[in-house]
Amino acid sequence: MAAENTVFVVDDDADVRDSVCALLESAGLQGEAYESAHAFLRAYVPGRAGCIIADVRMPDMDGLALQDELRRRGVALPVIVITGHADVPLAVRAMKAGAIDFIEKPFDDGQLIATVKRALTQAAGAREQAAALEAAASRIATLSARERQVLEHLVAGRSNKVIAYELDISPRTVEIHRAHVMEKMEARSLSDLVRAALAAGIPGAR
C-alpha cells in the first residue's frame, strides 16, 4: 500500500488498539491509535488518506456516531466497524451508513487485514474519481459561453448540422467550436469528451 495511507484505529480498549496496530505493522501497513472518536476528530487533518477501524461501542461517541460525524464533515474515509457483541441491528445500521464491513471480536487476523486492504483500495479509487471530476470541472470553466452550448448539444447526442441549426450558426463555426472544446477538455475522442462532461454534471441541451 502507498506510504501515505494510514489505518486510524479508534477504540477505547488499549489492548485492542495495541494488538490491531501490531497486526497492521506486521502486514506492512501504517496504523495510528486513538482512545476515542473525539481524540481522532481533534487530530485528523482533512485530506489524509487511509481508512478507519472503529469500535462500535465507545463512551461519548461510538463508532456509528463517528460515521455520521465524518459524513457531516465531508470526510470520505472508509470505516470498518468492529464489535465485541454480536448485534444484527447495529451491523445493519453500520452497513447502511456506509461501513465497509462489520467485524466481531475476536476477529480473524487475515480477515481484518483483507478488509483493510479492500478499504484502502476503495479509498484510492474514490480519490482518483474525485480528482478526475475536479479536473473536468476546471477544464469546463475555461470554455466560452458558446463553447459550453456546443458541449451541451454534443452531450445530448446532436450532430454538427443539428447544433448549427439550433444555435443559428454555420456548421463550419460549430466545427471550430467543437475543436476548441476538444482541445480545452483534453479529450482524445468524442466519447472521452461526453464521459468527462457527464461526470462533471454537464446536462445535455434539451
Image: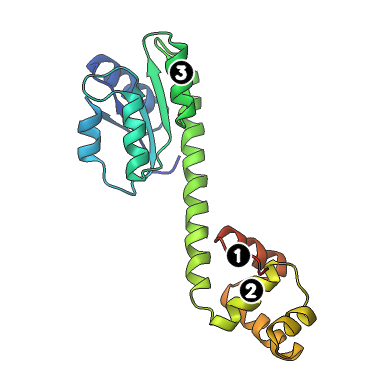
- Secondary element at image label 3: helix
Query: Who comes first in sequence, dot 2 or dot 1?
Result: 2
Residue 55 image position (x, y, % from top left): 33, 20
Query: Who comes first in sequence, dot 2 or dot 3?
Result: 3
Decide if residue 42 is in sight here.
Answer: yes
| Residue where numbered disc 3 is placed | 91
- As drawn, is 157 to the left or to the right of 56? right
Q: Amino acid at mark 1?
A: Ala
Decide if residue 30 is in sight here.
Answer: no
Q: Vertical placement of 196 versus 17: above or below? A: below
Q: Vertical placement of 203 versus 146: above or below? A: above
Q: Vertical placement of 46 versus 200: above or below? A: above
Residue 88 image position (x, y, % from top left): 47, 12
Q: Which mark is residue 189?
A: none
Residue 161 image position (x, y, % from top left): 79, 82
| Residue where numbered disc 2 is placed | 151
- Secondary element at image label 2: helix
The residue lying toward the viewer, choosing from 100 and 73, is 73
Whole-Å distance between the Cαs marked 2 and 1?
Answer: 8 Å
Q: Quadrant of residue 151?
A: bottom right
Whole-Å distance between the Cαs marked 1 and 3?
Answer: 38 Å
- Secondary element at image label 1: helix
| Residue where numbered disc 1 is placed | 197
Residue at 33% of width from left, 46% of height from top? Answer: 48
Whole-Å distance between the Cαs marked 2 and 3?
Answer: 45 Å
